[in-house]
Each structure stands twice: as structure tokens, then as C-alpha cells.
Image: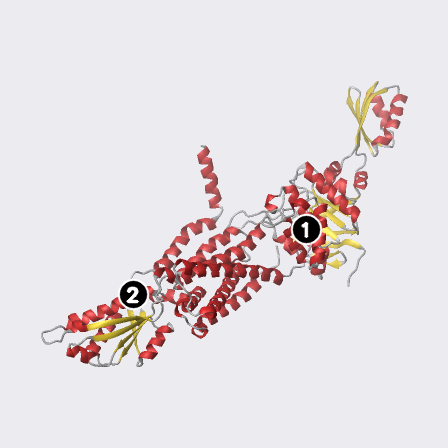
Amino acid sequence: MELASAAIQTTELTKRFGSFTAVDSVSFEVRRGEVFGLLGPNGAGKTTLVRMLTTLLPVTAGKATVAGHDVVRHPTRVRERIGVIPQALTSDLDLTGWENIDIYGEFYDVPRRKRHERARRLLEMVGLRERANDLVATYSGGMRRRLEIARGLIHSPEVLFLDEPTIGLDPQSRRAVWDLLEALRKESEITISLTTHYMDEAEQLCDRIAIVDHGKIIALDTPSGLKRMVEGADRVELEIEGDGASVATLLKQEPYLREVEHNGNGKLTLGADNGPHVVPKIIDRVESAGASVTSISVHRLSLEDVFIRFTGRSLRDEPAKKVSFLVGAGMPQSRG
Amino acid sequence: MKTLAIMRRDLLKLRRNPLTLITTILMPIIYLIIIGNSFQGQLKHLPLVVVAQDHGEYARRLVEQLLALQAGPKTVTVSFAPDPAQAIEAVRDGQYKGAVIIPPNFSHSVGEGRIAEVGLFTDNVDSVSASTLEGVMAEAAQAVKVSFVTAREPKLNQIVLRPTWLFQYVDYDRGLIPGVIVMAIFTGSLMCGVFNWVMDKFMGMTECYLVTPLSRWNIAAGILGSGVTITSIAGVTVLFLGLLITRGRIEGGVPALLTLIAIIVITSTGLLAMTFSILGRASHPRLVGAFAGFLNVILFFPSGAIYPIESFPPWLKAFARYNPETHAVSALKSILFKGADLAAVTRDISFLLIFMTATLALASISFKRTL
């Protein structure tokens, strides 16, 4: 019996498709009860990484344990302990919401009485109790997604994997999913792995975030920790009355400022590690130089700025997807 | 201009989907070969057993006429048997389409100018073959009359053919019921089994199964189980609807009904497993659609559901012998119309059981628990 304190642990985990390395020696650990975000551009290797962790893809090299079990040696034990909500809407349209959840519970051998109790509770939690007996074909995209989250929880998994859970949803539905995940986190010990492109979503929900690019984890920290990694990233916009050039020269000597740029007409742009904290110091320094501040504004670094800093602005050229010669273009099979 | 843009778009899509193009061009050719050879106009090589209990002049002439039909238009393939009961039983068992019994006093009766009867016992469940044999025998008797009428010949127009149907009357529509059942099974097995699976795979829904503790066996057995249930229900429903519409009945009561259900279930399982073996790993529903039509044509038309297999060219006859639908149709016909017991369809059911086992083994090998 393998047991590990971490909910997810990978060591040098690698996945190759022919000569293309989709996931390149990735090592990280997710603590139990943590909400862990995976951020990365298209084709970065996120989905491939998650597919290895959820036993969908064979591992090329390295090791991974999920809920304390090796994904290669004991895939069934892993499957019994995880819930997966894939990016595509996968609830059966021809079944009712209740049937979708109930049948899924049977896959995990959840006893009937327990299954029904949980299904009722989960449908209540996702706000679908009233629509439980309606066909899923009558549901909106947001309702289907909420149903699928409930479905993924029917067997009380230790680790829940969500792949782009709010993609294509309207703002109301997105908020509903967020509320649901936050409630889930408060009420249980579940570990959540969240793959997303939405920075606000990652910032709102995740305890820690890994930024993945070119198959590697290039940064891993809390959202605020990630921001701190980018030096002088807060932008302070300053307008002064006085000699802008000499004020700029003075400010360049201040240790708390990373960057000073004089734009002419008394306008300066400063780069600071912690913008709001240094504003009084900046004002004092400007006034000591015989000038006065007419306006000052601080633009705090967003997670999106951090993401762009780490991954760059260039668009990714993903490896060519396989297209059947005979049947032409099928459904795109994203590698991550 | 806008219309041309639409045309261009569609033509480009067609060019990038060669399967559609192949289906459009190749399938009609294959259909023509299969269907064309299955319906060849006049029937040929109908197996006919002759019991000549009289070896007199006129009996010999009648046999010569039948042999001439065998050598010329090849309508019949003549065999001889010594015992009438044995010959009739062989027709009942499906070895022959008909038995001609020339009674011991035949030539004498003709010579005496009295009515001389010839017995013809046909497998009337195959109404097309039965009516052809009646025609052939009438023609042979007529030829005896015409060829040998001289001033000294007796009154040959006293030869009378006594046709006897060995089974209940089965009209053309009712005779189609086994074929319709088999077609319902085939369509059901395709739509309920492999098409659903490939469509789920195409839509990304199988991903949900694959991350659960469901084993490869659980998934395959579950899909086969539901497919067999639905397909068997469809087969039995078509059976009753067919009997209702054609006002037919099942010879043999409850045991026969249970045997029919067993044949339907075995055939359903075999065909479901076969379609899974062939198409289970297809990544696109288009493939299933294209192959569905092809398989239906190559299996159904040479099955003997509409036209007797005996008249097929040798290559198609050889294919029909190993076609599961041939055995399903044959077994259903025997039980449904001939009141045959289980022993009479042992050969067909054994074939279907072997086919089912082989395709299940093949399906279990080809079915992968992967994306």
C-alpha cells in the first residue's frame, strides 16, 4: 500500500509523442486540501499532464502519484479516488440530470442508498434539484457544467480534476461555478486541480498556481508570490509641476524603485515592487526636489501581466494534429 | 459568386474526405455485383431428388426430360434416391428443394391410357423455388407428351402432376419475415453498439468512462449487453409485427417461440461483436456510416432472405455458406414455417454459436481502453 502525504506528486514526469516532448521532466507536489491551478498557453502541455495524472495517457518517463497511488502501477486505485470534469460537456443529453449522476455513481460501486442520498445533496448544492428529472438536453451550458461537477463528486473523490470548467460560460454561470468550488472547498477536505486560461479564475480560486510552458513548469507559487517574482512590476504613473528631468534623476537613486522613465511634460512612469507602499516616499522625494505632485496613480500587477512576463507574447506553434486521410478533419484532439 | 463560394467550400470538403468519394463511386459498383448476382432472373441449380419406382419406358422419358433441364438451362440439379419417404424427409431437412416420386405403375398406366400420376413434394417455404419446380415439372411432363406422340403412342395427356406442399402455405410477404428480422438485428446491432461508442468517442464522452474504475471488460460487456437487449427486442417485435401483418402463425408453439428468441439473441450477439471487431476502433462516425451500408448489402442479399442461394454463382454461393445472416435466415425459416425442432436447425445454430464466439473473442482483442 503506497501512501503519500501529498495529494499529487510528480517526479521528472515526461510524455513524448514521437519526437515531440509534450511534458518535459515535470516535478511538483500538491498538498491535500489545496486548490492547485495549472496555467499555460495553448499547447503548453497542461492537458497532457492532467491526462497522465488521471491515467488517460501512459507515462513515458518519471513517476506520478495521485491520492497516494502510482498512476502507472495502480491506475484503478487512482481512478477510484479521483473525479474528473473534462473540458468538453460530457453529460448524456438523452438522460435526466438524476440519471446521469446515479449511473456514474454505479461506476464506482457506491451503494444505492448512499448514492441516492449523495445525488440529492449534490443536486441541491449545484442548484439543480428542481430540474433533476428533466432531460439534460433541456439544460443550458452552465447547468450542464454544474451537473457535471456534481457527477464528478458522487463518489466523494479525494482529488478533483477540472479542465477549463468555465470555458464558454456566461459571467453568471462562471460565478455560479466559482461559488460552487469555493463552497466545496470550505465544506470538504478535497484537493482540486484546476486547469484554466482565465487569470481571474485562477487568482480567485487557487492557493497555488503552476505556470506551464513548453512542457515545463516555469513558475510555481501563490498568486501573490508569483507577482512578487516579477521585480518592479507595479506601475506608478506620476504627473508633477517642476523640472521633470531632475526629479527623474533623483528618483533613479531610490532603492525601492526598479525603473524610472521620464515621458516629458512632467510625466513619469515608475516601476516599483510594492506600488501602494512606496507612494508616500515618492511624494516626499518629489517635494524635496522642489517640485509638486499633481496626480499619482498605481497600477497593480495582474496575474495576466505575470503570465505574459513568464510566457512571453509570442503565439505558440502547436505540433500538427493527426488528421485521418480517409475521413478528413475530425474532432481536434488537443494535447494540452 | 456567392453560390460559387458555397460550391467551392463543399467541393474542398469532399476532396479532403476521400471516404465520401470512395463510398459514392465504389459502393454502387459493389452493390451492383452483389445484388445483381443475387437476383439473376431465372433460377438455376435447384436441388431436386428423383425417386423412380418405375423403370418403364415413360418413367425413363420423364427422367430424361429432367436431366435435359439439368444439362440445358440448368434449372435443376438432379439426384436420385431409392426411398420416397427418405426423399421427402430430405426435402423437409432442406437438402433438396423438391422431390419427384414416379410411382411403380407409372409407365403401365400411361401405356394403358389411364391417368398416370407423378408426385412432386416441394419445400414451399421457399415459394419462389417451389413455383419454379412446379413449372419445371409441368414442362417436363409436357415435353414427354410432345416428343413422343406418334400414331402408335398411347394417350400421353393422361400424365398428371400432383404437387404437394410439405409445409403450411407461406406467401411471398410472409416468406420475407426472417429476412426482415435479420435486417432489424443488423441495423440495431450497428446503431445500438458500435455507432454509439464511436459517436461518444468522437464527442469526447468516453473520456468520462476512462477515468472511472470501469475495466475494459465492464465497458465492452455493458455496451454488448445493452445492444443485445435492444436488438433482440427489435427482432422479436419485428417477428410479431410480421406475423400480424401477414396473418401468419408460429408452427410449434412455445418451444418454437423460445427457439426463435434464442436464434435472435445469438444472431444479435454475433453481429454486435462483429461490427465492434471491425469498427470499434474507428475514430469518426463517418467510417461507421460508410461501412454500415456496405456490410448490410454484402451480408443481407446473399443470405437467401429474398432469393434462393442455390441460384447464386459459385463464388457468391461460397460466401453465402459462411455468411452468418444465411444461417440466421435459414434457422428462422425452419422454425417459423416448417415447425422444425431444435435438432433440425442444429447445423445453423452451431454455425451461429461458433460465429458469435469467434467475433466476441475478436471484439475483446480489438477493443482498447484508451482515448
Q: Position of residue B172 (x, y in %)?
A: 35, 61
At a point 41% along the width and 70% down the height, the residue shown is: B339
Determine whether the residue tagged by mark 2 lies in a helix, strand or loop.
Answer: helix
Does residue B253 lie above or below A231 as drawn? Answer: below
Nearer to us of marks 2 and 1 is: 2
Label 1 marks a residue whose chain is A
Along the horizontal axis of the image, is A92 left or right of B271? right
Say which amino acid is labelled 1: Arg
Residue A273 appears in the figure: yes
Along the horizontal axis of the image, is B66 left or right of A198? left
Label 2 vs label 1: CA separation?
Answer: 63 Å
What number is the disc on residue A151? 1
Q: Which residue is mark 2?
A: B131
**Image color mode:** secondary structure
In which quadrant is the N terminus of chain A drawn?
bottom right
Along the horizontal axis of the image, is B224 left or right of B138? right
Residue B139 versus residue A47: which sits nearer the camera? B139
Q: Position of residue A122 (x, y in %)?
A: 71, 49
In the rendered image, the residue lying farthest to the left is B151
